[in-house]
Image (tube, rainbow, N blue to C red):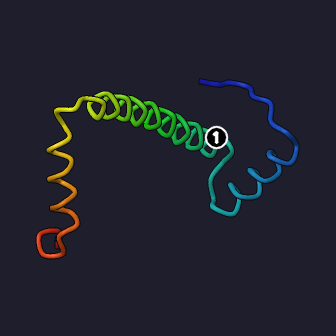
Amino acid sequence: MKTAISVPDETFERIERVAKKHGINRSQFYATAAAKYADELESNELTAAINAVADAVNDDDSTTAARAAANRTLSDPITSQW
């Protein structure tokens, strides 16, 4: 699929230079960059969702004992060795 985008001149020149240095064409560069950025954004969304669940669980007093036990285990130099 073809598409047109606008980028600042400095960005265009940088991309041209980097793509040439690595032996890839402009389309490959933009496609790879867009895919990586989309992956990053989706990962951030997933992280935010996981954090929201963790925050909700941590607001529940029933997790206090489990957190305390986990902290004791992790702070013990013998049991925390991987």
Give percent across and percent down for residue 62: 16, 32
Residue 14 location (% of width, % of height): 78, 53
Residue 81, picture quadrant: bottom left
79 vs 21, nearest the viewer: 79
- Residue 66: image quadrant is top left
Q: In the rendered structure, which amino acid carries the disc numbered 1? A: Tyr
- Badge 1, how many Cα within 10 Å: few under 14, some, many 20+? few
Residue at position x 29%, y 35% in the image: 58
Q: Nearer the viewer, residue 12 or 74?
A: 74
In-image side of 14 versus 63 (left or right): right
Which residue is identified by label 1? Answer: 30
Q: Position of residue 18 (x, y in %)?
A: 71, 58
**Which type of secondary structure does the marked residue at label 1 adopt?**
helix
In this rendering, is residue 81 above or below 49?
below
Is residue 78 depicted above or below 19 in this figure?
A: below
Residue farthest to the left, as pictured: 79
